[in-house]
Amino acid sequence: MHKKINWGIIGLGKIANKFAADLQLSDNSMLYAVASRNPEKAAIFSEQHHSSKFYASYEELADDPEIDVIYIATPHTFHFENTMMCLKKGKGVLCEKPMGMNLQEVETMVREARSRNLFLMEGIWTRFIPATAKLLDLLAKKVIGDILFIRADFGFKANFNREGRLYNKKLGGGSLLDVGIYPVYLSLITLGIPIDMKVMARITDTEVDGYCAMLFDYANGTKAILESTIEANTPTEAFIYGSKGSLELHSRFHHSEKITISQNGESEVVELKYNGNGYIHEIEEVNKCLLNREVESSKLPLMSSLDLTTLLDKIREEIGLRYEAKATTESKMS
Ligand SMILES: NC(=O)c1ccc[n+]([C@@H]2O[C@H](COP(=O)([O-])OP(=O)(O)OC[C@H]3O[C@@H](n4cnc5c(N)ncnc54)[C@H](OP(=O)(O)O)[C@@H]3O)[C@@H](O)[C@H]2O)c1
């Protein structure tokens, strides 16, 4: 293993640019190579973000023996095939969210990584920002008592483009998998797995969920009220209400830099700045795991991704939203 972790990036779109900028902030990281389907784009990205190499093919990047871990930043529907390709070529993977289009895909990816003893993690950067560490600490210390219910929304108005990845069903379009995943993940890390759910969606004429409303019920009576949309700008805040007070994760809650703690009529605002664009914290987690020869993050274990995907599948089943599956016969669990 190198002293620095050599990163590769596949799919040079919006998020890849932000992530590459944060890689420069990490002492343990080197952006070794980038790959695009378009050679000119790869060359420009490489120059902008100072990578040693660039490739016009995702496979060629994954074949490079100098690379330790590959960040997959393609649209959702390609996460499975891109991750499987990299794992089969012996590379660790940080895969953007959602890890796969359904549980069958994610189970297959997890099984492949485990059978090869390779690192695999879903890119839920929220898990690693300072606000999440503070939130989990406050909840563990029962600062607001027992949780009664939580409320979280994530909404933004995307320009309508039937071919773009947000509205195009073939590219995994819809609000749930793009942004609804964050309120659902918040419910998972604060309340666990619900025993029941009620879900309603507004389906667009491209047949994806433009808006999704979710109500989860838990064995102890706790509730979660969650929303997502790509059709309107909504506050994108999260509130956790407890028997002794409440916590507010300020907007945008999935990369919040401020928590308000309210108790007995008094409120305290805690500032929790993240570094760079906020991706540096997940980058450092991956580096730490690789340097310690760990194939899974203890903060975001693969079980979390399996649980999250199970919930997303259940929600989609409730609203009748089905995508073409990429995982075929090879994905059947043994
Ligand atoms: N963690 C976060 O904060 C965050 C934020 C935004 C998005 N994301 C996730 O990151 C992924 C990418 O999102 P993005 O907003 O960066 O998307 P984007 O700007 O559209 O970029 C996606 C890239 O994927 C590649 N690609 C491969 N096959 C493609 C195809 N058939 N159509 C379009 N692009 C294709 C393209 O790169 P090349 O042309 O270079 O091959 C494209 O630039 C999504 O899964 C999303 O959920 C995460």
Image: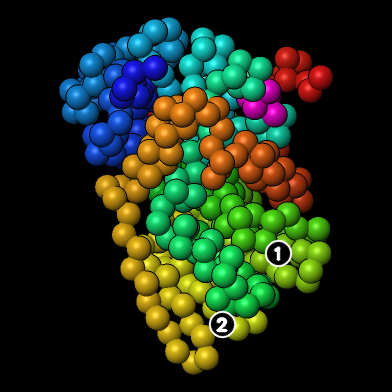
Q: Quadrant of residue 214?
A: bottom right
Q: Earlier in the sequence, mark 1 or mark 2?
A: 1
Q: Which residues are magenta?
A: 107-111
Classify mark 2: residues with Cα within 10 Å, few (<14), some (14-19) or many (20+).
Answer: many
Q: Main secondary structure of the magenta part?
A: helix
> Percent x, y for residue 313?
71, 43
State the residue at coordinates (66%, 17%): 115
Magenta stretch encompasses residue 127: no
* The disc label shown at residue 261, or none: none
Q: Quadrant of ligand 1?
A: top left
Q: Is mark 2 within 8 Å of ligand 1?
A: no
Picture quarter with the N terminus:
top left
Magenta stretch encompasses residue 108: yes
> Percent x, y for residue 39?
29, 13
For label 2, the SS is strand
> Percent x, y for residue 72?
45, 27
Scheme by which the image is coloured: rainbow
Would residue 166 be visible to someone looking at this image?
yes
Q: Is residue 84 above or below residue 259?
A: above
Q: Quadrant of residue 200?
A: bottom right
196 relative to 121 in the view: left or right: right
